[in-house]
Image (spheres, grey):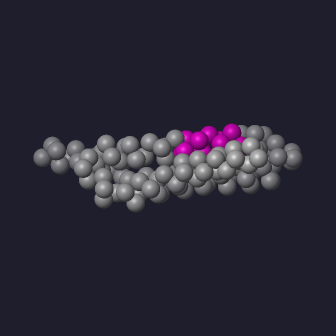
């Protein structure tokens, strides 16, 4: 009885499908927020919105990149031998980390040339 309750709580606490979607959506939201806050508020009377919004969105994106890196580790440790059923959600959760890794690699190769 107790293990059934513990399994239900564990499934609710870290759901790989929901976590992968949240990681991608929040990362995209952070990037879009940074972009549009810069366009609308950088040179206006509401510059404080730009300052705090930019800080918030950068923090959100960095947090999602970190969570994206930890997501596969959490799924594999939580699911044990059943992690292979969630490989697509592991890859979807890795999208922000892979995106920024690839973009940083491209940016570094452009500056060397």
Q: Is residue 49 visible?
A: no
Say whether residue 59 is magenta. yes
Q: On the picture, is 1 further left or further right than 50?
A: left
Q: On the picture, is 39 further left or further right than 62?
A: right
Q: On the picture, is 16 further left or further right than 23?
A: left
Name which quarter of the figure residue 36 lies in.
bottom right
What x and y, as percent, mark residue 57? 65, 45
Outermost residue toward the left? Answer: 1
The residue positioned 59% from the left and 41% from the top of the image is: 62
What x and y, as percent, mark residue 9? 28, 46
> Residue 64 versus residue 83: which sits nearer the camera?
83
Q: Is residue 81 visible?
A: yes
What x and y, as percent, mark residue 82? 26, 53
> Residue 54 versus residue 20: which sits nearer the camera?
20
Magenta residues (range) = 53-65
Most common SS among magenta residues:
helix
The residue positioned 30% from the left and 45% from the top of the image is: 78
Say whether residue 90 is magenta. no
In the displayed structure, 10 sits above or below 17; it is: above
The residue positioned 44% from the left and 56% from the top of the image is: 91
The number of numbered badges drawn on the structure is 0
Outermost residue toward the front? Answer: 113
The residue positioned 65% from the left and 46% from the top of the image is: 104
Q: On the picture, is 99 further left or further right than 11?
A: right
What x and y, as percent, mark residue 95? 52, 54
> Residue 109 versus residue 7: which sits nearer the camera?
109
């Amino acid at each position: 009885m107790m293990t059934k309750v513990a399994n239900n709580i564990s499934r609710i606490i870290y759901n790989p499908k929901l976590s992968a979607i949240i990681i991608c959506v929040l990362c995209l939201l952070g990037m879009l927020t940074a972009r549009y806050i810069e366009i609308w508020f950088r040179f206006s009377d509401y510059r404080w919105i730009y300052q705090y919004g930019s800080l918030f969105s950068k923090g959100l994106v960095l947090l999602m990149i970190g969570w994206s890196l930890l997501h596969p580790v959490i799924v594999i440790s939580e699911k044990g031998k059943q992690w292979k059923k969630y490989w697509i959600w592991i890859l979807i959760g890795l999208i922000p980390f892979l995106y920024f890794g690839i973009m940083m690699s491209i940016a570094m190769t452009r500056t060397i040339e």
